Amino acid sequence: MQLNRRVNRLLALIGLVVLAVVIFRKIVPSATTEVNQQEAEVGRTTTPKHPDSGSPSSSTNPLLQEVGEPDGILTHVGDTDRPRANATLLSLVRNSELRGIVRTMRDVERTFNSKFNYPWTFFNDVPFTEEFKQKTQAMTKAPCRYELIPKAHWETPAWINKDLVGVSSEILEEDDIMYAKQQSYHQMCRWNSGMFYKHPALKDVRWYWRIEPNTRYYCSIDYDVFRYMEDNDKTYGYVINIYDAPQSIRTLWPTTMEFVAQHPEYVHANNAIQWLTDNDVRPNHNVIANGYSTCHFWSNFEIGDMDFFRSDAYDKYFEYLDHAGGFFYERWGDAPVHSIGLGLFLDKSKIHWFKDIGYLHMPYYNCPASKKCSGCRAGRFTDAGYLNRENCIDNFFKYVHAD
Ligand code: GDP
Ligand code: MN
């Protein structure tokens, strides 16, 4: 009797797993053997044309020539007649990361914000502790705001199938995708993709500079970066351009193409699709990601115009992706999602490389040659040589900043 019950239970469990796999394959076509086979073939037959490229060579690396302030209209520290922009330093952070954010605030205040006094806005999915508030406010004379994320913006949406998330996370783990089973990481990526700009505390704010705990800033910035963006008609600023793990975004590009087929009117005539679809340098990435090069702006640093993210084009794109489920069934990051949205829906001339901002988020740097910088070696992209191939900024130069 007991044995029978056990057998029944086992059969029910097997049934559930089979059902989940069938549904998963329907929703995530690239998980089928066909693509795995394709991938294996590419791995066997194609050697990248530039096996070690990705890293600009020393003769062409623009970070090795003395890097000054950008061209265009600049507002310097002493230009008191010029108003500040409508902007905030923005940080999603956990209470447990207090030391890390304090360290980064010290850098940001020293290099930039002690001169310009932009407010800080901290976001968290749980309330900030009194200690967190005291120790961060002590780092700046600018006002700090501490904001709780509404549950509706943070929690996994109701249409996400938990069983399917379980099965998918096994597959992601087999593919060595970091954070595959950490639900909060998926939630964080979703929030950064399509929720931050909807927070009520930012309703009347236009510009943000995203700041992550434990990132480092090395160079003195003596002009107002937000005013630079506004006065020179820029929408998005980045420092680092890298490849993503293609196994984490297998269906992101096909899902994007579905959206674009429904809304061709959102695609900008002067887009950066060539940058998004390059398959010259790392063809394997393009194959596994089903048409996307995986090259993206590394979004732990970004200076951006929230009006772009609030536009119909981007926000409807996010809603479409959100319902497709890849933030949870795969591990779509906010970096590739922002990058694809920007690359398709924005005039590419509105994207700015802040080459003069010295930056580190482990393990990658942006290190300009400049007397204004100390602590990072000019031109260095990473301390781990084999990671140089993750740099795809050359692609961005090739297709976007051709000048
Ligand atoms: P990685 O850079 O991709 O390895 O991810 P991080 O661990 O640095 O997370 C990205 C950002 O989101 C950081 O600013 C973290 O502080 C923040 N973050 C990640 N998970 C959570 C979370 O569960 N709650 C909160 N409040 N912040 C989070
Ligand atoms: Mn990080």
Image (cartoon, rainbow, N blue to C red):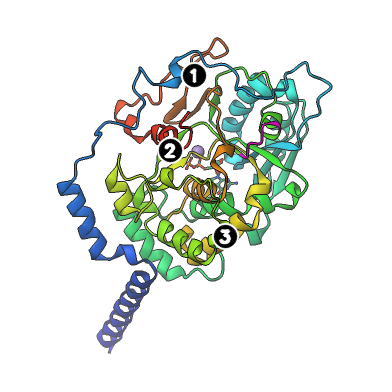
Q: Name the residue under label 2.
A: 399
Residue farthest to the left, as pictured: 45
Q: In this view, does 385 lie above or below 35?
A: above
Residue farthest to the bottom, as pictured: 1
Viewer-nearest residue: 342 or 220:
342
Report the Cα–Cα distance between label 3 and label 2.
22 Å
Q: Mark 3 points at which residue?
A: 265
In magenta, the rendered stretch is 231-235
Residue 168 position within the rendered picture, expressed as x and y whole percent measured from the top left: 37, 63
Q: In this view, does 67 lie above or below 212?
A: above
Q: Do the residues labelled 1 and 3 touch (CB within 8 Å)?
A: no
Q: Which mark is residue 368?
A: 1
The mark nearer the N terminus, 1 or 2, is 1
Q: What residue type is labelled 3?
A: Glu
Q: How many labels does the image show?
A: 3
Q: Is residue 134 above or below residue 346?
A: above
- On screen, residue 307 versus residue 65, left or right, reads right
